[in-house]
Amino acid sequence: MPSGKGRLLAAGACCLALTLTACGDDAGSGTGTGRLRMGLAVANISLNFAIEMADGAKQAATDDGDVDFQVVGPPDTDGPAEVQMFQNLVTTARDGVVLENLDPPIFTRPAAEAIDSGVPVVALDTAPTDGSKVEFYVGNDNYDLGAKMAAELVAKLPADASGTVVVGVPNPGTPVLDNRAAGIKETLAAKAPGIRVLGPFQTYSEPTKNYSAWSSLVNAHPDALAFLGVGDADSYDLARLKQEKNGDWLTAGFDVDDKTLQAVKDGTNFATIDPEHYLKGYLSTSLLIDSVRGEAELPSGWFVSPGLVVTADNVAQVIQRGSSPAAAKAGYQKEIDALLADPPAHVKPLAQAR
């Protein structure tokens, strides 16, 4: 989102943390009454996925009207650095923390220690590990999102298509991303048996490294039918390479960075998959606030948040939705209301998260 992106990048460059202050004068109580002190930790405060999550989370805090809300995260994906920021955050955000990360194992002990100290923790976007003591997770069905990308590709190819498709994953070993790649690979195997999938190859989340990785892959496989990535830098770097090399292969990725949406709008990329990060940020924070205030019990399990296939047919609406915080709130309000009307109806066992 352009407006959210500007706010976060400016603040992140100074201190890697943001504070949202809602109305009210009471100090954080730790009891669920009065003014609450809460926060969100993200894996990379510079990339669009985290910016959207933060915008949604902050809006949920604003809608409550009595929450001090802080967002922290490193400027580049750095698990150990985020661990330290998370540990610092739980010393001040005593009423609850939402945790998003790309390296779940290293957060197992810090999350458990936070919960043991009395700080409620919910997982966002990446399922918690056994031993973390985190029992509630808001995230997509990432395998399904990968399957949807593959289905969009198949629809663009001849019925008897044969050849190779190259798949990239920014951070191999991250379940969210690996599940997307698995959904792509297995769906192509089922729907287009003449296609051979190569990868997934590591493409890195940092944009410069990402571009370099994809450039090498494109050079190594010039006759590929398509190049598909499962992260947000994948989307716009593939679009850039296709334009620079005047490529006739198909390209697509994930997320709704401005450059990605422009690539879909102008036809460079045939699609992008929007995990609707704003929505997940809002849902996780709103549900945590309600539980801390005693207004609703926090479910145990995996709250399945939907995603959206973005093509030339609907990209204009997605661009409009991301044009300002007010537009985002308005654009997501129906989904928010429907999902929060009956949270347990959208919850599956944590063990099924993918």
Image (cartoon, rainbow, N blue to C red):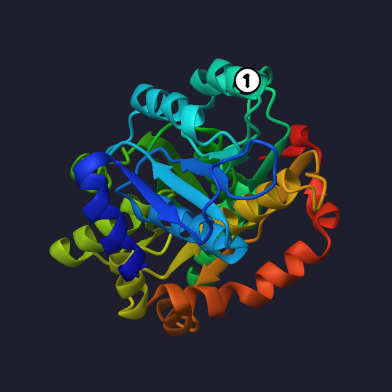
Q: Left or right: where does residue 209 sit relative to residue 138?
A: left
Residue 251 falls in image quadrant: bottom left
Instruction: Give the image location of residue 247, x and y in percent.
Output: 23, 64
- Please identify the quadrant where the C terminus is shown: top right
Q: Left or right: where does residue 182 sit relative to residue 81?
A: right
Where is 16 relative to 271, above or below? Answer: above
Q: Nearer the viewer, residue 288 or 4?
A: 288
Q: Residue at x 59, y 60 (%)?
A: 148
Q: How many marks?
A: 1
Q: Is residue 37 visible?
A: yes
Q: Is residue 160 visible?
A: no
- Provide the residue designation for mark 1: 117
Q: Left or right: where does residue 27 sit relative to residue 89?
A: right
Instruction: Give the image location of residue 280, x and y in percent.
Output: 59, 55
Instruction: Give the image location of residue 166, x and y in percent.
Output: 39, 46
Q: Nearer the viewer, residue 325 or 318?
A: 325
Q: Secondary structure at mark 1?
A: loop
Residue 4 falls in image quadrant: bottom left
- Please identify the quadrant where the N terminus is shown: bottom left
User: Mark 1: which amino acid?
Assistant: Ser
Q: Residue at x 51, y 39 (%)?
A: 100
Characterize the local packing of mark 1: few (<14), some (14-19) or many (20 or more) Cα atoms within 10 angstroms. few
Residue 132 falls in image quadrant: top right
Q: Left or right: where does residue 285 sit relative to residue 72?
A: right
